Amino acid sequence: MTVTIYDVAREAQVSMATVSRVLNGTAVVKDETKRRVLQAIADLGYRPNAVARGLASKKTKSIGVIVPDVSAAFFAEVVRGIEDIAAMYSYQIILTNSDSDLEREVDLVGTMWEKQVDGIIYMTNHLKSEHVDAFEQAQIPVVLCATEDPERRIPSVNIDNRQAGRDAANYLLDRGVGKIGFVTTDAEVSVLADRRWLGVASCVSEENLFRIQVGKGTYQHALPIIQDYLKQHQLDGIIASSDELGLASVHAVQDIGNKVPDDVKVIAFDNTRLANMVRPEMTVVAQPMYDFGAVSMRLLTKLLFDEPVDNLTVILQHNVVERSST
């Protein structure tokens, strides 16, 4: 039979209200009384009903996490950071996949609200007014993770993507690269990729910079597009806006009979495990993926606990990790 709060109260010889106070920490309980309640919980194997506790306290100790693709290595590492900090504060996460579909992204905010999550950590490739409207309707704290809000309306954690683009470009220019191709998703798909493009374009002359757009940016879709482009254009450097596109770039160069880095140097963004799995290993602009998640979750707890927040727009550091693709 299911053990109830009534059973615990009877076993500990206290009221159900006292058991509730011990579980929720809503009032001071004498040490001896608290000990008896905890012992009764252990003896009976009682598991509090999280939903019922949430209805009573208006807190469910759950956080909604919305990501574009839960299977991607980048987001897996970010979620690990979220989960580790959430556990420190006794929060559970509800993880869901949006497929980078605007309608689904907006619907998921409503779904999280229906589940009575205390807050949301949100990752999207392109923040739009529909997202902001959904956040405002939900009326719960939201933190953008590895996502940019150009108007800084919503708390966020990110890197300086434009500076990262400049760093990638200058790295290649310092190594004598002349003509550079920037492999990226469509600007409408990823505002972050567009920020990186602007950074690259600020360093490379217009006649020496070429934008290779590959739709949504999966390896399978990008590979033939990059191959076709390289057959028609002479490049000696490639900047890819993700490790997956960097992997496609390395293979495209090799598939048309050229060598990396002898003929074409390749640098990518992210620093997921893909960067080490390809040969030659890829030079990357490394993003602090775990820290994206950890800092976002910590920022969310500050909002939930009404702690002082010095800056609602947090910019983390990136760095270039040199490997054999350059």
Image (cartoon, grey):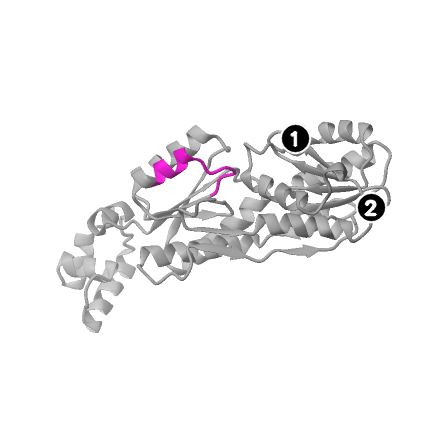
Q: Is residue 136 left or right of residue 190?
A: left
Q: Is residue 275 left or right of residue 119?
A: right
Q: Is residue 115 visible?
A: no
Tell which of 1 and 247 is nearer to you: 247
At horizontal 43% and vertical 34% (from top left) the residue drawn is 105
Residue beneath the point at 20% across and 49% down: 56
Residue that carries the numbered disc 2 in the rendered image: 261
Question: Mark 2 and mark 1: span between their CA atoms?
Answer: 22 Å
Taking 118 as reference, is 22 left or right?
left
Residue 136 numbered tag: none
Residue extending furthest toward the bottom: 31
Query: Which residue type carries mark 2?
Result: Pro
Q: Where on the picture, by quarter, is residue 234?
A: top right
Would residue 125 be counted in the magenta stretch?
yes
- Crowding near pointer 1: few (<14 within 10 Å), some, many (20+)? some
Of the residues under marks 2 and 1, which one precedes in the sequence?
A: 1
Q: In front here: 176 or 27?
A: 176
Numbered range of the magenta stretch: 123-135
| Secondary structure type for disc 1 | loop
Q: Secondary structure at mark 2?
A: loop
Q: Position of residue 163 (x, y in %)?
A: 61, 51
Image label count: 2
Residue 326 in the image: state x and y as whole percent: 79, 49
Considering depth in this image, is 196 or 120 the residue closer to the camera?
196
Return the residue at label 1.
214
Give the percent coordinates (x, y) of residue 250: 76, 39
